[in-house]
Structures are given as C-alpha cells and as structure tokens.
Image (spheres, grey):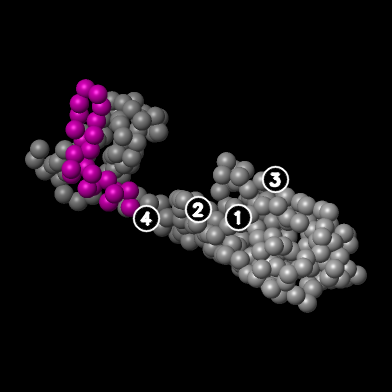
Amino acid sequence: MAKKKVGLPPLDWLRVFEAAGRLGGFSAAAREFGLTQAAVSQRIGNLEAWLGRSLFIREARGVSLTIEGESYLPLVQDSLQALERNTEDLFGKSPRELRVAALSSHIDALVLPALPTFLAKRPKVRVMTDSMARRSSLEEERTWLQLRYGRGRWSGRKAKLVALEVLAPMAAPDVCWGAPLIALRGERPGWQDWARAAGVRDLPVGQLSFDSIGHAMMAARQGMGIVLGSIPLAAGALKARELLRLDLPALHTKDGYWLTWPEDQARSKKQRALIDDFLTALRGAP
C-alpha cells in the first residue's frame, strides 16, 4: 500500500482506529460510536490509505492488528489521552462535586471532621458520601473515589495514605486498667497481639466482642470496658476527652487508611487538585 499523505490524519479516523484496536473488532467500535460497521471500515480504510500501511488483517472470522497496527495503537492511545487531559485542564470547568465511598465508621471518624477544612478551601464544591456496611462492598461500589483500610495495594487503583493504623488501650475517663476488655473480631491485631508486643502477661477478662471497631469504641465511650482502639478513628473522641488513652504502650501496625481511585480516573489537573485538597483535609482531621 503506497503512502499517499504525510502529517496528521483526521482525528475521527484515529479515534475509530483506537476503539477497533482496543475492543478487538470493527463491530464493537461501531457500537461504541453509534456507527455502522461499514462506516467504521471506511474510516479505517481511509486511515490505512493515508498512512500507506495496513493496520488490520481482515479475515472471515474477524480482524486482528498487523505488526504496524500493534505498534501504532499505543501511540494513538497516549496521544488521545494527552489531548483529552490537556483540553480539560485548559478549558474544562472546575469540578463542582466530590463523591466518596467508605465504611460508615470511617465517614464518621475521618470524613466528617475533615469537611469544614475542605469546604473552606472549596466553598463551591458539593460533597456526597456513600456509606458501606462492609469493606467487601467497596469492590462493587460505583463511586470511584473511596476511603479504604489496608496496606495501600489494590489492583488497578492508586492510593495515597491518610493515616497509619495505631492501636492503643483506651477507655472512658472513669474507667481504669483492670476493667473488662472489649474484644474486636477481624483482621486487626487483638488483645493477645498487643499483650505479646507490650510484654503484658495477665489480661483482664471481658464479656463483649464486636466485629466493628466503631461499635467497640462506642461501647468504650459508654464506660463498658477498655478497647484496643484505633488512634486515627478515635482522634475526635480523644480530643473531646470522651475517651482517654491509658498509660500503656501503643501497637503500630502495617495497615492504614487510604484515599484510593481507579488508575483511569482523576486524569485532569483540576480533578487531581480537588482530590489533593480533600486528602490534605483528611490528613489534618479533626
């Protein structure tokens, strides 16, 4: 195929080629753009004539990229993405909404205290929260900006640390060591882990066991015993002296609270700046 043109092909042809290469066929690209398969085939044929190279191998069972097509596809994708980002940065409106999903206890303890600082910086932004009962629900949640607990490694997601998890014995002001311990079931270290790290042999007994650290700390606030509480989640209660740390060692863990989003989201500078302002507020809360 002889090369007929030089310079940049029409953008419409490049977008159709990118979709056909990404989706693996002309029919799929036609559905994405609301075109007929014949229209997609014509645009790709025009592009091939412009470049003087075949980009697809056409067979009875479908199409596949040629070596030239495989080499050209990532270049086209990077260029289209850069054009989209730069256009948004230059001409797009500032984001007017921030929507975040998290466990209910994390919204209570981390998001709500951060909102005054964030809204003072972004007074025109509307904040929406989606609360989850269980962490597993976040995997199916459509809200892409999420506050998660873990070690900061989730496939396909970027993550920025809000706070590392530190656990410490804490209780209501009139409760002392020797009172019943409040147990917490789950993946966080428990009282036995804390005792080994702190060198404590004899632990008080307890009657309460929760599967939510938020509920466990609420029980402690009501004077029902001593909880191995999360310092980041209890920051507000500690500041208000609803809970007090006992004069005992804290337990530092490898987990933490992270603001996360899919790698293909927040690509524009304005969207990233909004997330950075929210992250700064979260780190400073309460």
Residue type marked 4: Ala
Disc 3 to disc 1, how far (Cα)?
13 Å
Kindly indicate the quadrant of the structure image that contains residue 26: top left
> Which mark is on residue 194?
none
Residue type marked 1: Arg
Kindly indicate the quadrant of the structure image that contains residue 201: bottom right
Residue drawn at x 84%, y 61% is 180
Residue type marked 3: Ala
Q: Position of residue 179 (x, y in %)?
A: 86, 65
Q: Few, some or many C-alpha atoms within 10 Å of disc 4 (few <14, some 14-19, many ≥20)?
A: some
Q: Dot 4: what SS?
A: helix
- In the image, the segment drawn in magenta is 56-78
Q: Residue beneath label 4, please?
A: 82
Disc 2 to disc 4, how far (Cα)?
25 Å
Answer yes or no: is residue 92 visible: no
Q: Earlier in the sequence, mark 1 or mark 2?
A: 1
Q: Earlier in the sequence, mark 3 or mark 1?
A: 3
Eye-nearest disc, 2 or 4: 2
Q: Position of residue 6 (x, y in %)?
A: 16, 49
Q: Residue beneath label 3, please?
A: 133
